[in-house]
Image (cartoon, rainbow, N blue to C red):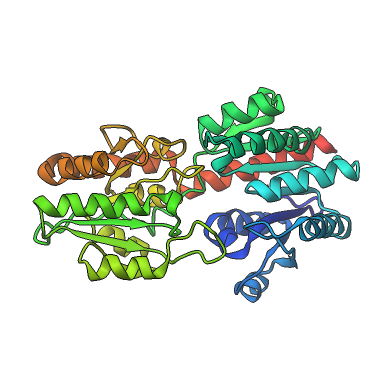
Amino acid sequence: MKINDYKKKILFVVNVDWFFISHRLPIALEAKENGYIVTIACHFTKHKQELIDMGFSVVDIPFSRSGSGIINELNTLKNIRKVIKEVNPSLIHAVTIKPVLYTGLVLKSINRNIPFVAAISGLGYVFTADTLRAKLTRLIVSAFYKVALSQKHKTVIFQNTSDESILTDVAKLKPNDKVLIKGSGADLTVYNYLPENSTDSIKVVMACRLLKEKGVYEYVAAAKLVKEQYPGTEFLLVGTPDVENPNTVKQVEIDGWVNDGLIKYLGHRNDIPKVFSGSNIVCLPSFYGEGVPKVLIEAAACGRAIVTTDNPGCRDAVVEGETGLTVPTRDAKALAKAMLQLIDEPELRVSMGAKARVFAEKEFDVKSVVSKHLDIYSNLISKDQ
């Protein structure tokens, strides 16, 4: 639907530019195509000029991803408040935990009923961990969510049913306050389904931010177990250490695994479709607070069997036993067993890959994801008029 009556303005509030480009860019481009003026407010690394060249307005907000003291956090809130007043948007779309919480709190503090889209792309460790610290933090964060999600005109976008259930209870959300959209989608013309190359040795690939919670250690331990039976199996690791995160996997550890012959390290790659199409199995043994991991959506689009965990978000990316296998979190032996099953049963593996592509076409087409977002924008703005 073209919006030509007058210029409507969308403000995206996101933690960092590279995440916006990888997870929300198609939505912003389509909004601009439909006549919206789009402003992106986030912490910029190296993509600022790239976004400007695309026709977006940009504003730098000093989001810290690891927490950097109360003064800096208050400064971030102050910056969000300033941006909202200066842009005067018709709608605000905040993405990930801190932008959602901070933007919601600022909106309440300035008493503005600007339509608010809160994208919950995973609740993080706070709502999954059982430590005393996590439980105490959960009480505090829950209180913030109650306030941040109390806007009159809002839509909360969830990626999985577990997060939806938790926050519906915490924030007392009504059915018309929320919608379930499984992930940020994949371009099915880029992530193509190609048959496996049966002449090569089995290749398993894991691609992610290299954090402990993503299950990197479990992946390497499972690789060692599988190689005891099938020494020729290749285990590829794609990604880079996240030096700003205290739970990052260190480069020296990666180098050690490579030297021990457990993995092949590919580092950062821009050709993930090619990497996946050249593999047989895609693995993500995460116990992180995921939404629906984009890497699993892309793996399904490429028609590859998936081995992941029975973790909220991860399990939403597969049809158990049909498009992939799920195992308990933090269980390298179960992970290795699932991989061995797919190595031992090539017909099952290939069948899962084919069904994964069909599942992706039904659930993860980026065109459908973008269309749903544009409908949300239009409906919220029309209610506010």
Q: At 66% across and 54% down in the image, what residue appears?
A: 31
Q: Is residue 51 left or right of residue 204?
A: right
Number of numbered tags placed on the structure image: 0
- Which residue reaches farthest front? 132
Position in image of residue 266 (x %, y %) = 33, 69
Q: Splitting the image into 4 quarters, where does residue 224 fall?
A: bottom left
Q: Nearer the viewer, residue 201 or 72?
A: 72
Q: 248 or 277, which lies in front?
A: 248
**Visible residue check, residue 2:** no
Q: Is residue 55 something that shows in the picture?
A: yes
Q: Please, is residue 210 above or below residue 214 in the view?
A: below
The image position of residue 171, as x and y in percent, is 71, 28
x and y percentages locating residue 168 in the rendered image: 64, 26
Apparent side of residue 351 relative to residue 35 in the rendered image (left or right): left
| Residue 110 percent location from the top left of the image | 91, 45
Q: Going 56% across and 43% down the picture, which residue do you hit?
A: 124
Work out whether 274 lies above or below 77.
Answer: below
Among the 4 quarters of the image, the one containing residue 363? top left
**Which quarter of the rendering shows the C terminus?**
top right
* Residue at point 27%, 59% (across, down): 277
Q: As rendered, which of 162 and 118 lies closer to the eye?
A: 162
Q: Is residue 173 left or right of residue 89?
A: left
Residue at 28 percent of width and 48 percent of height: 303
In this view, the residue in front, 378 or 360, is 360
